[in-house]
Amino acid sequence: MVCSCENGKETDFSLLDNIIEENRDNEGILINVLHKAQTHYGALTPQIQKRISEGLNIPLSEVYGTITFYHFFTMVPKGKYVVKICTGTACYVRGANKLVEQFSEKLGIEVGGTTDDGLFSLETVRCVGACSLAPVVTVNDEDIFKRVSAKEIDDIIAKYK
Amino acid sequence: MIDVYIDNKKVSVPEDFTILQAAKEADVRIPTLCFLENLQKIGACRMCLVEIENTGRLVTSCTTPVCQGLKVLTHSEKVRKARKFVLELILSDHPTTCLTCEKNTRCELQDLAAEHGIEIVPYRGDKSDRGKDSAANSLRYDGEKCIYCKRCETMCNTVQTVGAIYSKKRGFNAEVGTPFNVGFQDSVCVGCGQCVLNCPVAALKDQDDTAKVWDAIMDPDIITVVQVAPSVRVTLGEEFGLEPGTIVTGKIFAAMRKMGFDHIFDTDFGADLTIMEEGYEFIKRVKEGGTLPMLTSCSPGWVNFLETFFPELVPNLSSAKSPQAMVGAMVKSFFAEKEGIDPSKIRVISVMPCTAKKDESKRPQLGADGWSDVDIVVTTREFAKMIRQRNLDFVNLPDEQPDNPLGMSTGAALIFGASGGVMEAALRTALEVLEGHSIENIDYKAVRGLKLDGVKEAAVKTKIDGKEVEVKVAVASGLANARKLMEKVRAGEVDYHFIEIMACPGGCIGGGGQPIPTNTEVRKKRIEGIYKGDSSMELRKSHENPFIKKLYDEYLGEPLGEKSHKYLHTHFKEQKYYNNIKK
């Protein structure tokens, strides 16, 4: 097991090393490995990217390029609760952009950001497939809030505090 | 074979041809931008659009395969309008400051705009902001000018397997660059410049050092010493309209004199000297059981590559300095002593086919007694620019000779410019030293020629201490080939004694600092020029160069001797990279 100091905490890379080991000789495996690594570690930090690059023998430029291409991947750890606002066509015409502004203001973060206490991250998502419920907000992809209006925002945030 | 009609002209082509290939067969030129022959066909730039006659559909000719009876229009009204539209869109996110651009009059995008009669760019909108990187020793990046053709990415990843740059982000923010924006200097970039050589615009360019050279020439307190690499003499003419491979050695020396350099020496002399030191080093390693295979170390892109990706093979690299460094070292020691010049007043300037030579000249271990072997490096392209700045009629300059005592050279030195040349030159000397007599047939043709994929091999029988030995050698150029070969060396799967590697495909004649375009056809012509030059030389073995003999007699003593060790040998070490990425 190899550990490394980060923000005073020890990061345990043994699981990452296992993921890399299992996939080492498979071609086109990068996205899979990134997916698993992010699921476990919460974010693909530079250190994790370097380790994946060396382990899979893929240039760091390609690892980084792939991560920055896909919306799904993140390099900064996400909050405990990930608030996603659907900005698909139906939600958009029913005021999703206003919701984005208001959530952003109330949480004090930009889209893609995480609150300082690590509790909330704010994201937008393109169509969750529930257009009849527009505008839709989800939290951690589990809790779904339908036909959200501006005055409900405080209640939604309070639920997770 | 199937029949295809390009602008009503019938051609028979293989079934797996694209429309672009078929058009070439029909002698019809279709403009391209992102296309790289045999390397990249991605249909990204849309410049090569053509019309399928019966459907009226526009398709990218670089990606669309032909089919029986296909009728293609390459310059219909629809096609012309579409191409113009594509260009206008590209230009809407590209600066139109051509007059002050390094690539002015030498830009593919500018040529296409002129060709398509673009007079205004009708679209206004955001310009993408990709930043700049001027901090690297070898090259510079100006993101504002990038048109995202990805030719650099393909050269860096497919041809060189370096992987310093890759596509990042998406949509309007997409760019090609280093991870975490660390910049070239802190990345795994080896400085080979193949990206620069293939950039259609001025997004990637030489780290321009021409102003420094003019400053040195104009400074009355500074003594300038210039040298020119072997391959430059078969490529520089292209910058002035001559055919690739035309030998312009005498004109180069004439131009240098007119430009005002104080002493004109030749890297070819350094190449002869490198062969002496490297040849004797090889013999010593074979006789005394040293680390084998010995690897050549005169290509700085290759040396960077090995130090970065194969650090465990560092002991295999020949400790002999590269020819440019040897000339520099001899100028500042032997020549300075002889002429009574203070070495600190000397500036050694090299004209190189190579962007990585700029990086090499900054290696702290290349120098002695407080000075650097080489002070300023300019590429073939930069030197051509200086000739133009000096308003010289290069093509009509009468031939001149370099100065002595560091100017005379042999055919063995000239062939350093092509892949296989260092090996052949080394064999010409090493085998004679081993056998103790002159060898008639010195053309080692197995190691010659352009091999874009794979390794050239040869086995030569000789006698070492009375015992018959078969010396096995290998030659590769292009770092993808080098990587495959080094993986085998590392795994102990091959038993070569001596391996020559050049970072750039085809060797220095295909170097990152050479005239644009450098493609397969051009490379072949340059190689022909090199061997034609070699066969017409009076002396073709480095150890027969009378000034080399004199240098050893008067100054160095013997190859691998004490003075050689101090001035002509260096050391290498593992390169760490990505040191500046925050955790």
Image (cartoon, helix red, strand yellow):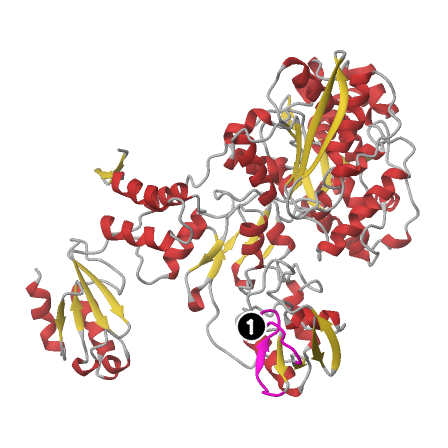
Q: Secondary structure at mark 1?
A: helix
Q: In which quadrant will I find the N terminus of chain A?
A: top left
**Helix, strand or loop: magenta stretch:** loop
**On the image, numbered disc 1 is attached to which residue?**
B90
Identified by mark 1, the residue type is Ile
Nearest to the observer: residue A135 or residue B15 = B15
Residue A116 falls in which quadrant of the image?
bottom left
Q: Residue at x 14, y 80 (%)?
A: A147
Q: Position of residue B370 (x, y in %)?
A: 62, 24
Is B309 left, or right, of B460 in this rendering? left
- Please report the bounds of the magenta region as a residue range: B54-69
Q: How many discs appear?
A: 1
Q: Residue at x 83, y 47 (%)?
A: B529
**In this picture, residue B498 sits left or right of residue B155:** right
Q: Position of residue B225 (x, y in %)?
A: 77, 34
**Is residue B55 highlighted in magenta?**
yes
At 56% from the left and 69% from the top, the residue drawn is: B43
Residue closest to the far front: B1
Taking the magenta stretch, the answer to whether it contains residue B181 is no
Q: Dot 1: within a 10 Å radius of its alpha carbon, few (fewer than 14), some, or many (20 or more) residues? A: some
Give the answer, above or below, for where A159 lies relative to B421: below
Q: Position of residue A151 (x, y in %)?
A: 10, 77
Image quadrant holding the C terminus of chain A, namely bottom left
Nearer-the-camera pick, B13 or B327:
B13
| Chain letter, disc 1 residue | B
